[in-house]
Amino acid sequence: MDNQSKEKLQAIASQLARPQGEKGIEIGQMMNETNIGMTLSAIESLNLASEDRILELGHGNCGHLKVLLSKADKLRYTGLEISDTMQQQAIDMNNELFEDYKIDFQLFDGNQIPFNENSFSKIFTVNTLYFWQEPLSFLKEIYRVLGTNGLFALVFAQKEFMASLPFTEHGFQLYDSSSVENLLNQTEFNTVSVTDYSEWVKSKTGEQVQRMYTVFLLSKNQN
């Protein structure tokens, strides 16, 4: 691979991890389009109910918010992002929803979740696992802010698929179900279900690829 090609792949990887600027806006829109199947799988798995307090970690431009809010009455949504570009895009794209719904978009450092214990009844994250700096520590943070009997949907593309994408050599930590289970076994989460999916999507470099992804649905049960 020549240096120019390597630099292009590194740039794509960097934007996928933390979209920035005009290029980041484009990447955010592409991610919304290509990840929507995974995002909808996460939302459906949570079985949203009236007055649920929802936290999404790494919401991107949050083009899915209207669909999410239609799932039940009086939902409260909080989105956390490490990208200020994506935070602003999410606010702009969903501006019309703020008047009728309780919505909050905040920035965070990707490690510490800035909320008290038991703050949320449902939590989900899609395609962020690869970028977690301290995976076990972050899972424990998610557990901390999840309420008793709450649900957490962790959604990721399988290592076998991700390894076929050239840009994942740059800054991605890849996982299969076994490695995720090993992580979760070091936490207090209970596994409710593990569901595998397959879909055809347009990759970040333009070609059609078959993506295998998995939804781990986890719970925080009363001790």
Image (cartoon, rainbow, N blue to C red):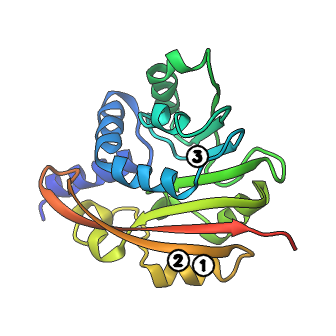
Q: What amino acid type should be assigned to the residue bearing mark 3?
A: Glu
- Above or below, 182 against 3 in this view is below
Q: Which mark is residue 121?
A: none
Q: Quadrant of the N terminus?
A: bottom left
Q: Residues within 10 Å of mark 1 (few under 14, many from 20)?
A: few
Q: Residues within 10 Å of mark 2 (few under 14, many from 20)?
A: some
Q: Are marks 1 and 3 in contact (CB under 8 Å)?
A: no
- Is any part of residue 126 visible from this angle? no
Q: Residue at x 60, y 38 (%)?
A: 72
Q: Which mark is residue 183?
A: 1
Cα gap from disc 2 to disc 3, whole angstroms: 19 Å
Cα gap from disc 1 to disc 3, whole angstroms: 20 Å
Residue 15 percent location from the top left of the image? 36, 45
- Seen as rendered, the residue at the extreme right is 223
Residue 163 falls in image quadrant: bottom left
Cα gap from disc 1 to disc 2, whole angstroms: 5 Å
Q: Residue at label 3?
A: 56
Q: Are marks 1 and 2 in contact (CB under 8 Å)?
A: yes
Q: Residue at x 49, y 53 (%)?
A: 44
Q: Residue at label 2?
A: 180
Residue 133 falls in image quadrant: bottom right
